[in-house]
Amino acid sequence: MLATILHMKARIFIFSLIIACLLPLQGIFAETDDRGFDLDEGFDPNIILTDNDVFSMDGMTYSRMVSFLRSKGTLADYRTTDLEGTERTAGEIIWQIANMYQINPKYLIALLQKEQSLVEDPAPSERQFDWAMGFGVCDSCSKDDPAISDFKGFANQVYYAARQMREKYYMRLLTNGETRSGYAVGRTVEIDGIPVTPANYATAALYTYTPHIHGNQNLWRIWRSWFSKKFTNGSVVKGLPSGQIYWIRYGIKRPFASLAVAMTLVDVTKAMEVSDSDLATYGEGDVIKFPNYALLRDSSGKIWLLADSERRHIVNMETFKKFGFNMDEVEDVEDYELIPYEIAEKITIESMYPQGRLIQVEGLRAVWYAEGGMKRLLEHPALLSLYFPGQRPQQITQDTLDELDLADPYLIHDGELVKTPDAPTVYVIEEGRKRPIPSGDVFEEMGWKWSSIETVPENFLEAYEEGAPILLDAEPVTLTMAAE
């Protein structure tokens, strides 16, 4: 068996080289279905799962997989013989075969649930284990047919299902461009009376394994229920393989129109890289088309200044010129493009700091962030290095500071990863609270980058109330717009 595994790993290495040369850049093109088929919101029959969802071992660690299975039912500790006849747990068998064929263990356990409900069934029968993956059993076949007896048994079922996906379907797609059943990336075929165009290798392979939309929709539902991540408010995520960058705000994903726009609002170097399927449960909000502090002119000729999620009307040209705005920077837009932005206080000749500015009373240490007639205290110098590197506060008088209304102190931004110098715990900031991330497995599976962690002084972080820990299987936290 060891020789077989080593042989397979060598073959997988060769496959990887082929993939690097042949794998095209693939986008996701969802369409609205008006053909009478009952599609769940977010389900696109052209892309069931991504290639990484099926053909990557980065899905989860062994300990995480066992913990997940135990949280759902009894499968993790079910004992049977492996391919060599040695008694092992089902968890050990799944992990061994996942590594042998470099198949995502998430996919294997989702398939076990789709085919025989083995993950969540509290008392599965031996027959369910014998045909765990539905491999070798066609719609009209009998499971008692001697011709398919070689496929019988839990280990055999997992082995043949993984082998079929990697060696038969995936390799044929890479070398011949299609599976034996004729499914191919970019080729439209009719399935259940509906034109379907697989957008990636995984989808073409999944239709080859299960040539029905309904069965694959069930797989997608299971995946979405179990593995679609619940991102904290303010998270910046990059979907893979689409490459689209989103800003998660109050349960909605808002795409940035371009990298240049994103860079004016968030730190794109800290974007979490996640599978596009992880984002399937999020409704898509309006595209963020304009950079922060953009100047936009509507159909009536009004000029607006954008500031984060708000727009402020510049009341006249005298005011426009006072603040050093330039007409060359003004962009004409359709009225509907301004709808996503809340109307805020007008900018008049008396307005102060419409574009935001660090200020400091001469001779005093306190630094403030002023914007739109409001002042926010920066309670710790760490905020300066985090969000205003290289910026020097404008020196003002106490009378000028007193003219500004007092707002809540300036906080660490939502989605920021922070820790203190002498403690290992990493937190993510959400709604003014620090939420602990309980383990490295959770950190990596969520898609965070270790390089994104900011170290801040202990006395600074202590001021933040501790929130609920980040749990991979937890329901999303319900947030209210009033909290913004």
Image (cartoon, rainbow, N blue to C red):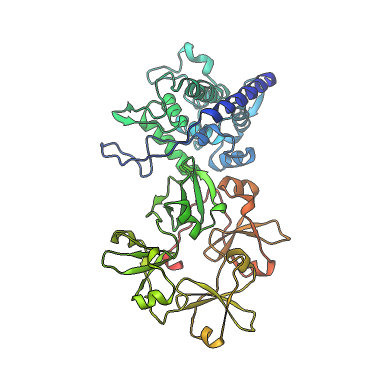
> How far from the left and from the top, in percent, is residue 447?
56, 47
Q: Quadrant of residue 204?
A: top left
In the displayed image of the protein, which residue is found farthest to the bottom?
Answer: 399
How many numbered callouts? 0
In the displayed image of the protein, which residue is found farthest to the right?
Answer: 422
Of 436 and 201, the residue lying toward us = 201
Q: Can the viewer see residue 438 in this picture? A: no
In the image, taking residue 231 as reference, residue 289 lies left or right, namely left
> How far from the left and from the top, in percent, is residue 248?
46, 55
Of 16 and 260, the residue lying toward us = 260
In the displayed image of the protein, which residue is found farthest to the top?
Answer: 147
Residue at 47 percent of width and 54 percent of height: 260
Up-down: is 410 above or below 149? below
Q: Can the viewer see residue 195 in this picture? A: yes
> How far from the left and from the top, in percent, is residue 99?
62, 29
Residue at 51 percent of width and 55 percent of height: 235
Q: Quadrant of residue 467?
A: bottom right
Position of the N terminus by quadrant: top right
In the image, taking residue 323 as reference, residue 468 lies left or right, namely right
> How far from the left and from the top, in percent, is residue 365?
64, 79
Residue at 58 percent of width and 75 percent of height: 393
Up-down: is 36 above or below 208? below
In the image, taking residue 191 as reference, residue 60 lies left or right, namely right
Of 339 and 443, the residue lying toward us = 339
Residue at 45 percent of width and 13 percent of height: 145
